[in-house]
Image (cartoon, rainbow, N blue to C red):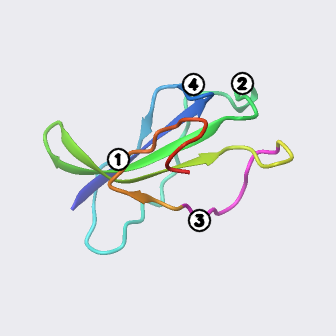
Amino acid sequence: EKALKAVQVFANGRPLALPTRTAFKAFSSRWNWNEWLTLPIKYSLLPPNAQLAITVWDVCGPQKSIPVGGTTISLFGSRMKLRKGTVDLKMWPDQAADGRQDSLTQ
């Protein structure tokens, strides 16, 4: 199976930048990218309610992909500090992350 991740920064339900994507990868059992992404926006420009919308896409063919799952996570914690470290994310099966303020994939 070939897959990729798309990550986009949102605030107030609107995208703040274009999506960033990982490279296509073939997987057999465990899906693990182990890859850094550079977001196309400076952290100093992010509002306190900024969030990441992350979608894993199954690449079925040329220009055809379907969502494996998606999730949305806030970039800042309750004290308005940028989140750090490893985070376990709940992936909503068969749904693309929506990036809305009251996200259905949060």
Query: Which mark, by number, is residue 23?
Result: 1
At label 1, the amino acid type is: Ala
Mark pair 4, 3: CA separation: 24 Å
Please name the residue that numbered disc 4 is placed on: 16
Mark pair 1, 3: CA separation: 21 Å
Is 65 magenta? The answer is no
Is 88 magenta? The answer is yes
Residue 105 shown left or right of residue 67 in the figure: right
Task: Name the residue at 13% across, 39% down.
Answer: 62
The magenta stretch is: 81-89
Element type where label 3 sits in the image: loop
Going from the N terminus, do you reach mark 2 or mark 3 first? 2
Going from the N terminus, do you reach mark 2 or mark 1 first? 1
Going from the N terminus, do you reach mark 4 or mark 1 first? 4
Query: Which mark, by number, is residue 45?
Result: 2
Task: Name the residue at 56% across, 51% down.
Answer: 106
Q: Are marks 2 and 4 in contact (CB under 8 Å)?
A: yes
At label 3, the amino acid type is: Asp
Magenta span: helix, strand or loop, mainly? loop
For the residue pair 104 and 96, the one nearer the viewer reads as: 104
